[in-house]
Amino acid sequence: MSIARSLVLATALTAAASAASAADDDGNFAVKGAGLETCQSYLQAREQQGNAVVLVRSWLNGFVTAYNYRTEKTYDIAPMHGIDRLEAMLARVCGEDPEQPLVQAAVAVSQGLQPARATAKSERVELSHDGAQVSVPRNLLVRGQQRLKALGHYDGPIDGQYGPGTRGALTAYQEANGLDTTGLPDRATLVRLLSDQE
């Protein structure tokens, strides 16, 4: 089956994906649409900038939605990642093993995102410092404050507010871990910070 035909089928199946079982007793599950293709097929389509990539992106959005639906204590596996970032991550994982099925690469991306997932619906807050801006779910900011406190960088209240204490703690953590010192809970900082506890 060509990737284009497979991906057309994938868009039709995306709506049904959230109703699927997580897996059988042995951890097996049926793979539909683009997930059946190899990473090599996807990478070739991506290199040629063909329409198949648009369909992979649609399939990936459906995969992430189903993952959110079926994964315990997960509201959003990628609260700080849009489809461009998710697809770039998929391409990177595929590049490591082009013979693997696309679904296997998508599972690996989702597992890598697990530590910094949003565990509950939360309002987004817009933060800025020194001309840089980020948008982050407040509950991730709370989790960040908890980790910063546990690591000895923060001694303020765990309130999800972005004040001087939180900014200073984030800056100290970023400096200690070789990250850009923005003082903001940016994607790279939160992923690293929240992954440290796993």
Image (cartoon, rainbow, N blue to C red):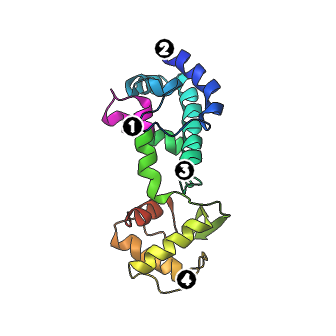
Q: Which residue is mark 4?
A: 164
Residue 151 visible somewhere in the drawing: yes
Magenta stretch, main secondary structure class: helix
Q: Earlier in the sequence, mark 4 or mark 2?
A: 2
Q: Where is residue 122, by image quadrant?
A: bottom right
Quarter in which the C terminus is drawn = bottom left
Image coordinates of residue 150 in percent, x first then y, are: 41, 79
Label 3 is placed on what type of residue?
A: His
Q: Nearer the viewer, residue 102 or 43?
A: 102
How far apart, in angstroms, are the residues tagged by discs 2 and 1? 30 Å
Q: Which residue is mark 2?
A: 2
Q: Earlier in the sequence, mark 1 or mark 4?
A: 1
Q: Tags 4 and 2 in contact by the CB under 8 Å rule?
A: no
Q: Nearer the viewer, residue 176 or 159?
A: 159
Q: Which disc number belongs to residue 81?
A: 3
Label 1 is placed on what type of residue?
A: Asp
Q: Which disc number belongs to residue 6?
A: none
Q: Residue furthest top?
A: 1
Residue 183 visible somewhere in the drawing: no
Q: Which residue is mark 1?
A: 26
Image coordinates of residue 51 in percent, x first then y, are: 57, 22
Secondary structure, mark 1, is loop
Q: Earlier in the sequence, mark 2 or mark 1?
A: 2
Q: Residue furthest right?
A: 123
Q: Tags 3 and 2 in contact by the CB under 8 Å rule?
A: no
How far apart, in angstroms, are the residues tagged by discs 1 and 4? 50 Å
